[in-house]
Amino acid sequence: MDTFRCSAASYVSPKAQWHCGARPVGRGGFGLAASKPTWRKASTSERRKMVVEEVRHQEEAERSAKAVSLAKQRQWMRWKGLERRKLSWRELWEMEANNISFIIRATYDVLPSPKNLNQWYGEDPTCDLCPIPANLKHILVGCKTSLTQGRYTWRHNQVLKSLAAALESKSNTINSLPLRTTNSIPAPTLSQKERKGPITALLGLKPGN
């Protein structure tokens, strides 16, 4: 496979990178991309990693293709400039079921907002405080009436109060613990002759001088 065909194929599927190497990324041009071993020259661990990346790439492509055809669940594909949040299994186990449900439904914009209720059941989509259709973004940060009345500030302060209470409780718990006692090692006691020994040796004098 020549250079042009390898470069074109590597952009279509990561499988071609196994034989052709890494595709160029950025403005560096050909030959300046990060080195990546080919399948023939890769070790066992590197081949395992390449297979995992290929499977992950295919699953992500299928998930994105399916999300495009959905009306609500594809909303996350339009997000730009947002910080990604990765939840580990440990964090999921420690979270309450209501919090997990809210995070997942808010991510895919399937919470029962007035606009979604209008789409599902034909209810009134307007906001209770202003005549604008109330979607999730409008309820959380976009209602000008809520901003003017200080509702967002009140919500922000309630979150800070919860954080302050949790920090104060943790601080009181730590401060109530008994102090740790360390076993101190006594300093060695030297006789007068032993104390003078290193000094006389340093000065090049004999012990009798």
Image (cartoon, rainbow, N blue to C red):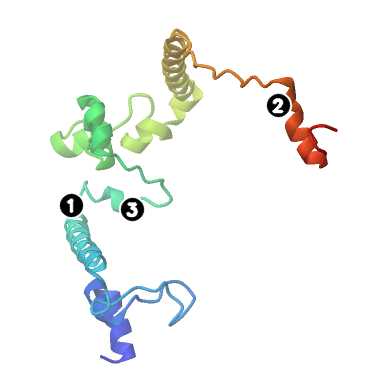
Residue 207 placement, left or right of 140: right
List x then y, in percent, for residue 2: 29, 92
Mark 2, residues whose alpha carbon is within 10 Å: few (<14), some, or many (≥20)? few
Which residue does the numbered mark 2 point to in the structure image?
A: 194
Q: Residue at x 49, y 16 (%)?
A: 183
The extreme front residue here reads 208
Nearest to the eye among marks 2 and 1: give it. 2
Q: Hey, what amino acid is under mark 2?
A: Glu
Residue 70, numbered circle: 1
Quadrant housing the C terminus:
top right
> Can residue 126 be seen from the camera position used here?
yes
Q: Residue at x 15, y 37 (%)?
A: 120
Q: Residue at x 30, y 75 (%)?
A: 11
Q: Give the alpha-carbon distance from disc 3 to disc 1, as whole Å.
A: 13 Å
Name the residue nearer the viewer: 120 or 67.
67
Residue 176 placement, left or right of 37: right
Name the residue nearer the viewer: 117 or 160.
160
The extreme bottom residue here reads 2
- Disc on the earlier residue, 2 or 1: 1
Q: Hey, what amino acid is under mark 3?
A: Arg
- Disc on the earlier residue, 3 or 2: 3
Q: Hey, what amino acid is under mark 1?
A: Leu
Quadrant housing the N terminus:
bottom left
Q: Give the alpha-carbon distance from disc 3 to disc 2, as whole Å.
A: 79 Å
